[in-house]
């Protein structure tokens, strides 16, 4: 069992930055992929970014490419999401997820991730 725990959400003005953290505890060797998803009110959960623990391969949604950066600290079992140039449409609950299969990084599907955090709210004001 892997337990991701997010932190770092909050309220920021458009154009500002936030950094989310996801600390993974438990049997972390069971997770090959780490992903960030978000869900805005009335919308489906959508892929934001993903990273493979081994090799650090990363993928991004087109909507955040060039603005968001996913990174990892293997020693701390922690994944980060640096969010710059935030827009009001980035407002959502952000979830960290861990997937047992490295393929989850490529599929970008929430269903391919096995363990989920509780989410952290990010609100971007205009």
Image: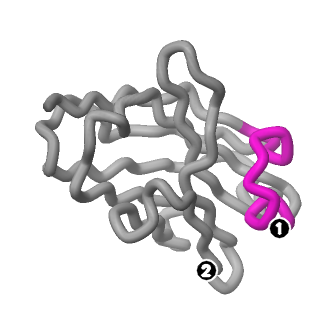
Query: Badges 2 and 1: C-beta atoms under 8 Å apart?
Result: no
Side of 94 where 60 appears, left or right: right
Of 28 and 47, which appears nearest the observer? 47
Decide: is 87 above or below 125: below
Side of 36 where 32 appears, left or right: right
Disc sitting over residue 53 in the figure: none
Q: Residue furthest bottom?
A: 55
Q: Which residue is depicted at the point 55% across and 51% down?
A: 48
Decide: is 58 above or below 40: below
Q: CA distance from mark 2 to mark 1?
A: 11 Å
What residue range appears in magenta? 102-115
Question: Does the magenta-highlighted stretch encompass residue 65?
Answer: no
Tell me the residue that label 2 is attached to: 56
Dividing the image into 4 quarters, which one contains the N terminus?
A: top right
Of 35 and 107, which appears nearest the observer? 107
Q: Secondary structure at mark 2?
A: loop
Place of residue 117 in the rendered image (x, y in percent of width and height, measured from the top left)? 59, 33
Tell me the residue that label 1 is attached to: 102
Q: Which residue is depicted at the point 38% across and 70% down?
A: 66
Side of 86 where 81 appears, left or right: right
Place of residue 41 in the rendered image (x, y in percent of width and height, measured from the top left)? 49, 16
Q: Which residue is depicted at the point 56% across and 64% down?
A: 60
Of 68 and 87, which appears nearest the observer? 87
């Amino acid at each position: 069992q892997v337990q991701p725990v997010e932190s770092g959400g909050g309220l920021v003005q458009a154009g500002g930055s936030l950094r989310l953290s996801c600390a993974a505890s438990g049997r972390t060797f069971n997770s090959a992929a780490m992903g960030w998803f978000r869900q805005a009110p009335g919308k489906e959960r959508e892929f934001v970014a993903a990273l493979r623990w081994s090799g650090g391969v990363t993928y991004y949604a087109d909507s955040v490419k060039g603005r968001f950066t996913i990174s990892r600290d293997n020693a701390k079992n922690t994944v980060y999401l640096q969010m710059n140039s935030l827009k009001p449409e980035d407002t959502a609950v952000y979830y960290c997820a861990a997937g047992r299969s490295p393929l989850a990084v490529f599929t970008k599907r929430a269903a391919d991730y096995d363990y989920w955090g509780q989410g952290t709210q990010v609100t971007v004001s205009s």
